Image (spheres, rainbow, N blue to C red):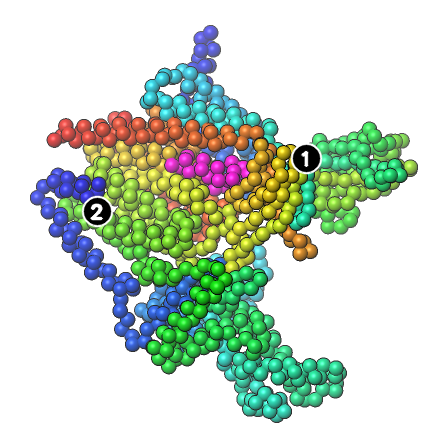
Amino acid sequence: MRFIQNCIRLSGSIKLTIICLIITFILVAGGTVYQIDNGLLAAQDRFFSSWGLFLFGFILFPGMKTIAIILSLNLILNGLKSFSLSFKKSGVLLMHIGIIVLFAGTALASIYIKESVLTIYERQKTTFSRDFSLWELIVLKKQHNSANHGYFVSDTVHFNKLKNDTKITFPNTSISLAFKKLYQNCTAPSIDSLQPQKISADQAGNFPGIEAVVISKNNIENSENRLLLYGGKIDPVLFTMADDTLYFMLKPHEIRLPFEISLNRFVNINHPGTTDAKSYESHLTVRGDGINRDVVITMNRPFRYKSLTFYQNGFMTQNSFNATTLFVVDNPFRFVPYISGLIIIVGLFITFTGKFAGSVIRLKNNNSDKK
Amino acid sequence: MIVNRIPKRIYHMKNIKSYNYRILIITCLAHLLPWTESFSSSVDTFSIEQFGKIMVLESGRKKPMDTYARNKLVQFSGKQTVKGESALKWMCRVLLEPQNAEDDLIFIINNPEIPDALGITPRIRRRYNYSELYKSISQMDKLVADIVKKDPGEWTAFDKEMARVNRNVREYMSLRSVFSFGEPKEQFQITDSIVSAMLGISVLRPVSHLQLLYRVQRITRKIEEIQTKSADSLTASEQEAINILRRMREMERMIGNPQPHIIPEFSFEGEQWYSLWGLLNRYHTDAMPHVLMNLMLTIRECYLRKSQVDFDAAVTQYREYTVKTFESNRAKINDPGVEILYNRLNPFFFSKVLYGIAALFSLLAISYLWRYSYHISLTLILAGLVFQTIGLIMRFVIMGHPPVSNLFETFVFTAWVLVIIGIVLEIIRMRNIGVLISSVTGFIFLHIASRYSRDGDTMGMLIAVLDSSFWLTTHIVTISLGYAGFVGAGLVAHLYLIQKVVRKEENDQLLQSIRAIYGLFAFGLLFTVTGTVLGGLWADQAWGRFWGWDPKENGALLIILWGLIVFHARVAGVIKNNGLATGAVVGVVMVMCTWIGVNLMGIGLHSYGKASGGGEVFVTYLIIEFIFLAVTWMFLRKKNKTLPVVHV
């Protein structure tokens, strides 16, 4: 019993808070320096979104997720231990509540948040956006229906689930694929080669690649049946084996939007005499799901609809047609940072103004005593 | 409030009639004012003041010629004057009579190896003139050609300086050739008598580009006539006509639309600005006798004749025409008056000087060496604050947004906040700490800011993501307040640790210092947290995420974490007064790492805060702080002094 009591006391102690803060400090500083050579995504994986990591290759160090949980527990226990309804302590209590809300909100958001990118040309419309962090290997078959000569998706596998030197069988086809090399980000300098690239922090800047061998239903692996797939290629790759004609393709996961979006025009205004953008404007029309109106998205002025938010992300011009790129975020916990931030600031304000006022009063009393 | 408080302070310091000192200092300052350019009357008979009001487009911003001239001169020489002559006068000479500006020592070369490499005699003051650099231009081009082949990340200090000097010389060349289209050139000399008769130009005499341009239709008509002829069947005069036109077009292509862009035009492409050459190259024919072009030629002629009335009239006409062009296109062009006044007043320079002198007096005050020094210091700080406030307001008026959009402005703004914090502290505590914070930080931060103004214009245009007055005001102003708090705490902490080492006994002043450190540190933390949260909200609005682990964001988080570590350690009794002071000193290091250090990393989304250079100075600062803390702690451990923890 005493052991449990000691554990609870230790878990709620301010010294544990200090240790957690120091570890967080090290993680943030380490991750920031790590970004210089390894990029943001690598730093996030290793420092900011991990449970633990090895420092210098052998020192086991807690990751940000572990620290966030320990710190939350520490704050809760500390709050329970020293809870009292006094104005003096309300500031500290609010700050701690704010931090717990922030951690909880961040944890929930990391589970439910969906980020995707939508690129649309002027006078075109779309009903889906693409999640470039989630690539899919799809197998297409030609429809033999006389009325429709299109393709249908026979099988889909998430790229993240694939591993080097493994085999996967597609249930709706008679073939399997043996994966030789997988690239998170690569380029295709020629038709039969892939070149690995450094992983970009920009979600839409990574194009995966696959080097595989197609295996027939007889389980014969022939190196001549080599298949090369590149995420940056728009057209599917045709593969014929015996009577089977299949098309393979690597493409980002598509997220269906609740409405149809069409780009009426994109306006890019530069400061005169420069190529520095003064403003970007996407003039859109949104139709469906009970909404039918024109919308203008600019920097610092996104379009929000329920839990969806559309941000101006970039643009491009091709054959004198402008295209806008919007960043689409579906985050049901979007308001958590706003609420928690407000709670923390109010808590800090109460704490420090209380101390400041007390200090001034004490100083005045001291001065009057001296007189 | 300040005024009410000052008499009380005087009351405490019996027998000191410091009113007299204030009056004396204010009188001195009033006498200093005429030193600013705004109130100076020119001793020259020919005034070019009106010329300074002509608007120029540079880096997307429309600015008066006065600002343009200053920026260019600062960019070339690091100074705003040449031989005591204003930048505008220098610019007038460069643009309107370039042969009289060739011997100005305006090109600063900071690397001593460069003059050797160019074969120039090194000068002690490191400034060189155009004549001597022009002689080495081919050598310079050769060196630069080798440099640009390298990856910019691998450039040595020599390479960087060489590239900078070359860029400046090239820019200068484009400035001095503004009217070169009117200068006769050997390459346009006509050798054929038939062509000579057709154009009405003497044979074998150098001709200017403009002279040919006025006759270009005759040349093109001639070429149209012979279009069907084969190359072999062309006569000598026909070949001459073709060659002349080709040479003209080659020159136009080579020159393009160089700076300065002084002629605005509105077309379906929107607002476009041209230099005189740019305008010629846009129209290519004599069908272009543009009003502004003709007026500019008149301005030059009047300048060379030193005809004041005609010069002023031509410039006024030029300005009126520009304004009308904008008005007729429903566009806006600012009146240059405020900016010219700002330039001539040079408020931040005066503030810096006043804070610098005040810092010396505040050191005397804190050492109790001279009893009047406190009042002198406070008065100088207040005078500096007035100048600085005027400067910030003027920048706000000129740019139309809060003056916190680049590193220069954030340093100036934070200096302003620190000066106010110092004065407020003085009102509350009355212990000399406030004047010390105000004067020292005011001087240092304005000095750092002046380093960021060396590249020229400090009033850059806002990029699209920053173009939000609300977020710019709330986020950056709040963060700057936070930085100011940490820096203020750190400064007092330095003083506290020095006093702790030097003094034999603890005294009241040390206790006051530790209270000030605690208060300022808390102030810094409060506003850094608020500013960071607001920054997160802005990022959510602009980029779609509250937090993205960007180096600048992480820097702010590190400051907050450091603040929290220090406060929690203090509450838990892990650290005492010395620890708090040390934590505050490290707090300044954290702020500097975020403010300046992160920009040197060259990564992240906060590209508008990026800066190159200054890495050595920054590392030196870090080493000095480290040595300071190591030495202080060594002495403190020896003395093993402890003060009772003050509950603040």
Where residue B443 sits in the image (x, y, percent)? 30, 50
- Look at the picture and state if B130 lies above or below A350: below
Seen from the viewer's position, the closer of residues B606 and B195 is: B195
- Look at the picture and state if B538 lies above or below B114: above
Question: Is residue B116 something that shows in the picture?
Answer: no
Question: Is residue A103 something that shows in the picture?
Answer: yes
Residue B534: within the magenta? yes
Residue drawn at (85%, 39%), measured in percent from left and top?
A148
- Point out the stretch of residues depicted in magenta: B527-552
Mark 2 lies on a secondary structure that is helix
Mark 1 lies on a secondary structure that is strand
Toward the right, the furthest residue is: A243
Residue drawn at (49%, 66%), measured in percent from left and top?
B264
Label 1 crowd (10 A; few <14 / some 14-19 / many >=20): few
Residue drawn at (40%, 15%), measured in percent from left and top?
A81
**Would you name the residue on which mark 1 appears?**
A256
Residue A232 falls in which quadrant of the image? top right
Seen from the viewer's position, the closer of residues B607 and B540 is: B540
- Give the residue type that dot 2 points to: Leu
**Would you name the residue on which mark 2 appears?**
B378
Seen from the viewer's position, the closer of residues A255 and B328 is: B328
